[in-house]
Image (spheres, rainbow, N blue to C red):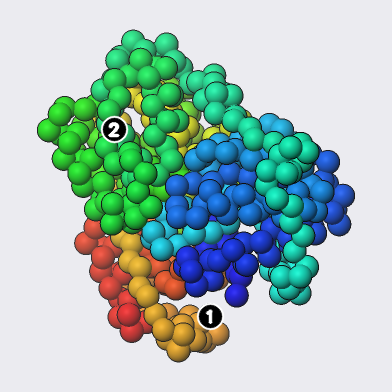
């Protein structure tokens, strides 16, 4: 079964992620492009460092070529935001990234992009799924990669310099150069090494790297930048006195930050820092967009500047669409992905890292100082996160309780309202909230809770988990 979630189609290599399924997805996209008559600009393809990613990109290219559709393949490991950048700047109506982002090493997958370099909508991915269900291997048209290259149908491209130069053009490079920051980067065995090095060294930062070799097992760890997985980065930042530690996930669209004291800066706080910085220090104006499971600290910051915070379902396509609609300054999510006005329509860990470095240099303040400034003005917002796996039978039970019967725990805090827009989110009268929602890419139910203290958030989360029998 080929099923697209919020982050694309992801499956275990050797089970559902096999060549036969990859080429079926490619043929479905080719059919859509032909039906919509948008084949002229062709399709851009890129890939990450996962097992079979490079080969998968060639398989996709061969299918497109077999359908007479021009292909621009970034024929080297590429951050997902770089692929989106190319699609945006070259007017491709469709693009594909071979990646499973931050998923475990046994996974690989496909992300689809549409015009403007944005994440495909559910309408598009639903269409891909329905077409795939009607296809057989005999329906797949392919042309040999080298033959298609000779005929000019497949063209190998490298937009790396343009991408880095575009980011540099959006940063205050002179301010960064004056500070000569010492930066430690952890690509988590993913694809951000060259991009972050080029960006930061261009700004005259001193840059060192760890975990930068090619390892399809990601060092035995999840390639997701969290307080746990960035433990070595945190220790080295303190030991070697770096100004900041920067970690990125497998395809570099999300980041994790370690401050000079070795503290992990939660992605919620990264979003708050950058929105606050853009409004107060750079003089920008405009709203902010966050998903339904991201901190309400952004709401408080927006309100204080006379702006609005918009809440959307999980999935960056919802964030980018609302940003475009409202001309928002910044949009992001609690998992570490964000973008700002004027950049690509998707999350970009490379750009976000550069903007954080700029913030430190322009303000002359450490990350902890900036956070103290924000919390002193807007109060404390503490989030807890729990991921729980379940059986198929348990999922049916959870769906029945939460979404059909719409039952809730007997919370000891007054409830203001309940939303079922994306999962079940309970808003409390004290400004706190809790949400339970199913992951779009893994067999998980995720429970997020936010209160003014960790103890309150943990307490309300325990109530929900106990109620659900998790």
Q: Which mark is residue 209?
A: 2
| Quarter assignment of residue 412 | bottom left
In this rendering, the label closer to the viewer, 2 or 1 = 2
Residue 285 at x, y percent in the picture: 56, 29
Residue 383 vertical placement versus 162 (above, below) = below
* Quarter of the picture holding the N terminus: bottom right
Which residue appears farthest toward the left when viewing the image? 239
Depth check, front residue: 304 or 289: 289
Lower sequence index among marks 2 and 1: 2
Residue 133 vertical placement versus 37 (above, below) = below
Residue at left offset 50%, top offset 72%: 15
Label 2 residue SS: strand
Residue 437 vertical placement versus 432 (above, below) = below
| Quarter assignment of residue 139 | bottom right
Residue 64 seen in the current view: no
Residue 135 seen in the current view: yes
In the shown orientation, is residue 92 left or right of residue 167?
right
């Amino acid at each position: 079964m080929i099923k697209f979630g919020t982050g694309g189609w992801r499956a275990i290599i050797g089970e559902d992620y096999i060549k036969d399924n990859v080429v079926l997805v490619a043929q479905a996209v080719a059919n859509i492009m032909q039906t919509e008559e948008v084949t002229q600009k062709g399709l851009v393809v890129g890939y990450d460092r996962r097992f079979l990613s490079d080969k998968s990109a060639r398989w996709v290219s061969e299918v497109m070529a077999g359908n007479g559709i021009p292909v621009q393949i970034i024929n080297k490991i590429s951050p997902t935001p770089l692929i989106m950048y190319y699609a945006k700047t070259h007017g491709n109506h469709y693009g594909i990234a071979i990646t499973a982002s931050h998923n475990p090493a046994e996974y690989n997958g496909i992300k689809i992009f549409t015009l403007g370099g944005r994440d495909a909508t559910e309408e598009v991915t639903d269409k891909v799924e329905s077409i795939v269900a009607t296809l057989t291997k005999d329906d797949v048209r392919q042309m040999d990669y080298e033959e298609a290259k000779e005929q000019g149908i497949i063209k190998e491209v490298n937009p790396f310099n343009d991408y880095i130069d575009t980011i540099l053009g959006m940063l205050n490079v002179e301010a960064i150069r004056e500070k000569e920051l010492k930066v430690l980067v952890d690509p988590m065995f993913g694809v951000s090494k060259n991009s972050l090095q080029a960006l930061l060294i261009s700004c005259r930062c001193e840059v060192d790297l760890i975990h930068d070799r090619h390892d399809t097992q990601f060092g035995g760890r999840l390639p997701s930048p969290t307080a746990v997985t960035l433990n070595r980065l945190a220790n080295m930042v303190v030991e070697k006195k770096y100004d900041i530690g920067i970690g990125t996930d497998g395809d570099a669209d999300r980041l994790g930050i370690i401050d000079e004291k070795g503290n992990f800066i939660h992605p919620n706080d990264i979003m708050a820092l950058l929105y606050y910085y853009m409004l107060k220090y750079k003089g920008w104006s405009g709203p902010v967009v966050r998903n339904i499971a991201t901190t309400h600290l952004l709401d408080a910051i927006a309100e204080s500047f006379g702006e609005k915070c918009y809440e959307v379902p999980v999935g960056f396509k919802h964030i980018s669409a609302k940003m475009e609609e409202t001309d928002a300054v910044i949009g992001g999510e609690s998992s570490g992905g964000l973008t700002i006005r004027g950049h690509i329509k998707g999350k970009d860990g490379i750009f976000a890292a550069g903007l954080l470095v700029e913030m430190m240099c322009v303000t002359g303040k450490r990350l902890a100082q900036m956070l103290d400034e924000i919390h002193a003005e807007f109060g404390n917002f503490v989030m807890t996160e729990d991921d729980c796996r379940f059986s198929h039978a348990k999922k049916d039970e959870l769906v029945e309780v939460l979404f059909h019967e719409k039952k809730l725990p007997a919370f000891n805090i007054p409830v203001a309202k309940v939303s079922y827009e994306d999962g079940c989110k309970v808003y409390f009268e004290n400004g706190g909230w809790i949400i339970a929602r199913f992951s779009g890419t893994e067999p998980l139910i995720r429970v997020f809770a936010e209160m003014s203290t960790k103890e309150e958030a943990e307490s309300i989360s325990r109530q929900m988990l106990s109620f659900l029998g998790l």
